[in-house]
Image (spheres, rainbow, N blue to C red):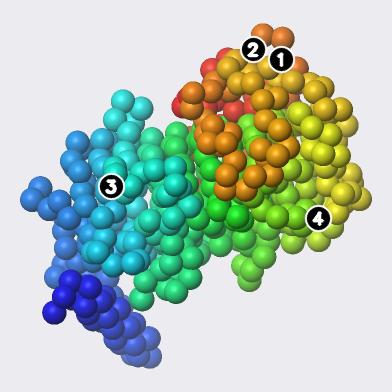
Amino acid sequence: MNRMNHMNTKKYFYHLSLALLLIVAISACNDDNPASVVIDDPDDETVVTITDQISQLEGPMRGVLLSGKTYELVGDLIIPEGEEIVLEPGVTIIAVGDGGDIGPEITVHGSFHSLGTRQNPNLLSVPANIRTHENRFAGLWGGIQGSETTASIVLKWTRMEYTGGEGGPGTPRAGRIRYGIWTLSDQTEVVIEDSWFYGSKDDFYRPVGGKLNIVRNIFEEMGEDGGDIINVKGGTVGNIAYNLVIGGATNAFKPSDDGESTIQSTIGIYNNTILNSGYRRAGLNRGANINFENGARGFAYNNILVNNKRGIRVLDDSDLSNIDIDYNLYYATHQEMADEFIPTDSEGSTLQVLGENNIFGNPGDYNPLFVNYDIDRYSMDDYNAGETQPLEMNIASPWNFRLQNGSPAIGAGRTNFEPVPVTFTLTGDAAPTIMQPSADLGAYPSNGGGLLLN
C-alpha cells in the first residue's frame, strides 16, 4: 500500500470509529444511565500522545510540542474533541505533506495553542525552498481548520504563512478551498496576538461564530483575487485592534451576522492601520478595509485607512441603529480613491452611521506621516495591476508605520469607550490581552502601547 492510500485508510477508520461511537452515545441517551458511555476516553489508544521521540505529526494526537524542536506535518494532524496540543516557545512546524496534491492541515476538534514569545516565536510554514513570493497564493497547506466542537485556538507570537488550497477527504472543508483558519461554533474561543501572517489563497480567517480577541498582529498580502482577512459570520463576538493590514485582496475586516446562530455578531474594530487593500478584487461590489453588513453590529474607531479602494462601508442590511463609525483618518494619493471614501453603492447607509469626527479631505490631505514609508509612491496602474502589483506594495518590511511628530493622527482618537465585552475561560499564557483604546489613531500609538512587531 502506498503512503497516500495508507493515510486515507487511517483517516477512513478514524472517522468511522467516531461515527460508531456517536451512534452508541445517542442510543445510550435512552438508557437509565447515559453517563456510562464515554466518547472521548483520554486513554483511547487511537490518540497518540506526543513524546520526546516524536518529530512527525499526523493523525489523532495530543500533547506538548517542545521548545526549540522542529516537527514535520506529514499528514493531517487531528486534535480530537476534549484533547489539546500546546506549542512551547520556539517550535517550528513544517507542512511537508505526503507527496500528494493536497497539503496537510491541522484539524482542531479540541484545542490548539501556539504559545510563542517575543524572544522565541513559533513558525507554522512550508519548506524553506518554496517560501517564495510566487507561492503566496498557492495554498501550500491547509492551515488550522476547526469544527463545531473546537474549544479554543490560541496563536501568540506565531508566524503562519502560505495557507489555503483544497481540503482533503474526511476534513472539514473537503473538496473546497480552505481558509487559513476556520471555526464553526459560537462557543469557540480564539485568541490571536502578536503574530505575523503572510499569503493566503482566500479568506485568512473565517469565524462562523466564536469569541474573538485579535490584537497586535501583522497581515500581509492576503487573498489572490478575492477573500477577506477576517470574514466574520453570525454568532461572532469580539474585538479586532492594533493590527497592521497591508495589501488585502478585498476587505481587511468584514462583520456579518450571516448564519443561524442566536448570538448577534458584534465586533469592535479600533486602532488598526490598513493600507493598499481592495484592488485584487474586481469591481466595486465589496468594501476594501472595514465592511459591516447583513445584520452585524459594532463600531470602528481610531483607525488609519490609507490608499484603500474604498472607505469604511456599511450596508443598509446591517444593524444600523447599533453601528458607529467615527474618529478614523482616511488618506488618498489619487482622486479615484478619495471619490470612494464614502462608498458610492452604500452612501446613504454609511452616512447614517458616520460620526462627525472622521478625518478626510482631498487627495494628499491629512498625511498620517509614517516614520518610514513613502505614502505617495504608487500610481493607480500599480494598484490596479492585480497579482503583478509591486512586491513592496503589500509587505510590511522594511517600512516603519509608527507616527512622526506632527502627525494629524496623534491625539485625534476616542478613548471613552470600552471594547466589546467577551467572556473567555482561557487562563494563564493562553488568556487574551484586552486592549484599551488609544488617543493616537492606528496600530502604533506614540506611547508604545500598541503593535509591537515592526
Q: Residue furthest left?
A: 53
Three-letter code for the amino acid on which mark 2 is drawn: Gln
Q: Which residue is mark 3?
A: 127
Looking at the image, residue 263 lies above or below residue 3: above
- The residue drawn where x is 63% and y is 62% is 234
Three-letter code for the amino acid on which mark 4 is drawn: Leu
| Percent x, y of residue 233 | 62, 60
Mark 1 and mark 3 lie on one chain; the one further toward the N terminus is 3
In three-dimensional space, the C-alpha distance between marks 2 and 4, rounded to whole angstroms, equals 35 Å
- The residue drawn where x is 43% and y is 37% is 195
Crowdedness near tag 1: few (<14), some (14–19) or many (≥20) residues, C-alpha within 10 Å: some
Q: Which residue is mark 1?
A: 407
The quarter of the picture where the N terminus appears is: bottom left
Among the 4 quarters of the image, the one containing residue 338: top right
Q: Is residue 78 visible?
A: no
Q: 34 or 312, which is in the foreground?
A: 312
Mark 4 and mark 3 lie on one chain; the one further toward the N terminus is 3
Mark 2 and mark 4 lie on one chain; the one further toward the N terminus is 4
Report helix, strand or loop for mark 1: loop
Q: Which callout, 2 or 4, points to the residue nearer the camera?
A: 2
* Number of numbered discs on residues: 4
Q: Which callout, 1 or 3, points to the residue nearer the camera?
A: 3
In three-dimensional space, the C-alpha distance between marks 1 and 4, rounded to whole angstroms, equals 31 Å
Crowdedness near tag 3: few (<14), some (14–19) or many (≥20) residues, C-alpha within 10 Å: few
123 left or right of 378 in image: left
Q: Which residue is mark 2?
A: 404
Report helix, strand or loop for mark 4: loop
- The residue drawn where x is 68% and y is 58% is 256
Looking at the image, residue 374 lies above or below residue 263: above
Q: Which residue is mark 4?
A: 315
